[in-house]
Amino acid sequence: MSELIDVAAGEGLLAEPVLSVRDLRVWYGTDRGPVRAVDGVSFDLQRGEILGLVGESGCGKSTLGRGLLGLLPDGAASDGELFFDGTDLLSLRPRDFNRLRGSQLGMIFQEPLTRLNPLMRISEHFSETLKVHEKGISKEEIKRRSLEALRVMGIPPTRFRAYPHEFSGGMRQRLMIALTLVVRPAFVVADEPTTALDVLVEAQIIRILHDLRATYDTSLILITHNLGIVAEACDRVAVMYAGKIVEIGDAREVFSHPQHSYTRELLRSTISLRTTGLNYIDGAPPDLVEPPSGCHFHPRCPDAMTVCVQTEPEPRVLPNGTRAACWAADLRSDVVSLSAEDRAPLVREEIAVADEA
Amino acid sequence: MELAKQARGAESREGQPDLPPVVLTTADLSVHYALQGSALARLFGMRSATVKALDGVSLEVRRGEVLGLVGESGSGKTTLGRAVLGLAPSAGGSITYHTDHGDQVVSEMSRRQLRGLRTNLQMVFQDPTAALNPSMTIREAVGHPLVIHKIARGRELHQRVNEALERVGLSPVERFAPKYPSDLSGGQKQRAVIARAIILEPEVLVADEPVSMLDMSVRAKILQLMLDLQEELGLTYLYITHDLASAKYVCDRIAIMYLGRVVEIGPTAEIFANPRHPYTKALLKAIPEPDPTLSVPRDLPRGEIPDAAVPPLGCSFHPRCPEAVAQCGWESRDLRALLEQHWTRREPGTFEAEQDLVGNLDALDTPSTTARLAGDPVQVGELLERIRSEDPDEPLWLGVDSIGDVGGQVQVDFRDGVDPPLRRAGGVDVACVLYPDQDA
């Protein structure tokens, strides 16, 4: 299992990670059998680090994010190890987990208005949050800390006593971030925090998230389908496909030299200002009740070989420092040797034009 | 799987003397929505405020082109798309659809006439799940327009639905036609919506964010389908989007919209190579690029789209504009924003002292080129001077005509602003004071 342990390139000898995830699995029960939404995920998160989590819809990004906070719906089960500050969160009693949540572990959601109470002033939101998590905190301290959090988010102190509806969409998202950070959590999951916002406001929020570590010592997992956001705001990136992390590493390195075929195809299918031809990935992400054999991406992969159908690739650290689970990448970097039979290109089944996500 | 982009008219058209004919014109088009006032105001028949969703938009759309309407939410791009189809109440100006049999003024049509228009103008919606009736099979949904307009029935209907489904890639037809929308993926549903839009063989298709609800791996596929259909069927597109990257790829011309107006319009290549309006520049800079060599931009416009019910004086973009100058329309609300911004950088104690000094700022919310601040004139004057010295480059100060003591209060007088119209600048039209009339 030692290969599974992911070490951030060049910082491996630094302090203890904030969060250590080992072989995390999350599944939902259905009539047809368990849906393996997160299927053996391992990674470390360093203090103050921003890790981007990307992939198509239905790849398990949100489930993983919620699983890390113990916020899974009824009917979901999880297994594996989730070390936070030396404790395995998954072995905690629900009450103890609940105590950590909010004060040590935070979450920022996509639609902020549904998370704010329309009948409470902003000041009341702050005082409630602080009182719940820091018993006996003084009134002056509440005000000082709240105004400080607002200031970092660029919200004028004159708005402290306003109601949520008096704020614009971008301001509300900043409020949510301020409310999450005011208790100084060690680690925060942000699930698509800018998807509902306009381009310019989105850029403002990304900048705020990017600058967070200057003010707070918070580690952040940023879940998004927008690869551009990851490139601009994250230190490292994890690419998820069919419930697994297929590639993880330094964000710059992963984007400039993608190793896994899925990462490469995902980058190619993104429409950016420099797009000169439209590319896409054939087919759709698999049904997680019965995922394909071997590498789950093989039915859609342009590089698929015979071995990809038969044997699931191990996650391996490649010469460029990223960790990927891809036979083609292993072969390219001479990390493994494969027989000619294994290397034979896979004759792919025809995928109909409209078989898509 | 690389799909070559077809060489389309954009570049070649510029040099040609014979432009394709204009199919659609909007002239000074305005759409206003009434805001619901208080119950008492309505009881007394008082006029409630209106939001100018569209405020004097003049455009020409030529046959076979893809015109992009790009802007943030609240820019009026969707309203413009709906108005073209007669789906938004026009408060002024006109929309004219030019056919071989003469002009049809959409904005004056009755409901019945509008229905006839639908055989020529069709729409593709953003959310395919909401656009399809969940209790109709794909065959029924796609064939519905032919039934409503009594164009085909029986075998011919069956045949035409098959053709439309094949055209949009929903083949083998027998596999998709009997399905319900809930059985299909997002991309497949959008294909069905497109099939329904083209089955009447329309001339113009308004596509409102056709790919923004879809997963990123299929966006390119659906866009390519739309481009292929345009080629095969000779369609004209109004492509509405907030995504400049996809607009750059599919559009021949682009209109950048802000708060109900077109602020810049021109050929796509020119807009991207040489953006002129500060808003266009900001939008281009804000797009997150999946390129690790670029970093987070620092000089982005502050704030958000203002309230369209009481738009800023002068140019609507001036409160956020990094290039604003003296005559952009500075006013009392900008002074309030400046004070509040100043306070976000102060310690709580300083903020409270300064706020007590100037008192309630609500009087500044009424737009005016004259702003008065309560409190001791000397101290308030010093406060303003302090704010100015902290950031002397703040463009608001360019618009200040004078600061004086009037009746024991500090009065700030702003210069009168200019609301710039669209004017020719290089290969495009821009509405910005930085680009005065070339002929003048």
Image (cartoon, rainbow, N blue to C red):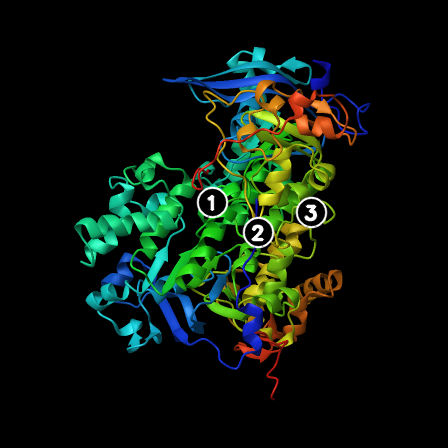
Q: Residue at x 56, y 28 (%)?
A: A298
Residue A111 % position (x, y): 48, 40
Q: Nearer the viewer, residue A84 or B46?
A: A84
Instruction: State the CA–CA distance, disc 2 to disc 1.
Output: 18 Å
Query: Within 10 Å of the Cα at label 2, are there few (<14), some (14-19), or many (20+) other Cα atoms?
Result: many
Q: Nearer the viewer, residue B48 or A14?
A: A14
Instruction: State the CA–CA distance, disc 3 to disc 2.
Output: 20 Å
Residue picked out by circle 2: A201
Type of the residue with mark 3: Asp
Left or right of residue B18: residue A231: right
Residue A225 in which image quadrant: top right
Residue A114 image label:
none
Residue B232 in which image quadrant: bottom left
Query: Within 10 Å of the Cα at label 1, are there few (<14), some (14-19), or many (20+) other Cα atoms?
Result: many
Left or right of residue A125: residue B404: right
Residue picked out by circle 3: B291
Left or right of residue B160: residue B381: right
Residue picked out by circle 1: A164
Type of the residue with mark 2: Val
The residue at the far bottom in this view is: B440
The N terminus of chain A, quarter of image = top right
Indicate whether B184 appears above or below B145: above
Instruction: State the CA–CA distance, disc 3 to disc 1.
Output: 36 Å
Q: Residue at x 30, y 68 (%)?
A: B47
Inspect this view and state whether residue B341 appears: yes
Q: Residue at x 62, y 27 (%)?
A: A305
Type of the residue with mark 1: Pro
Indicate whether B32 appears above or below B245: below
Q: Nearer the viewer, residue A357 or B45?
A: A357
Residue B356 % position (x, y): 60, 55
Q: From the image, state whether disc 3 or disc 2 is nearer to you.
A: 3
Q: Mark 2 or mark 1: which comes first in sequence?
A: 1
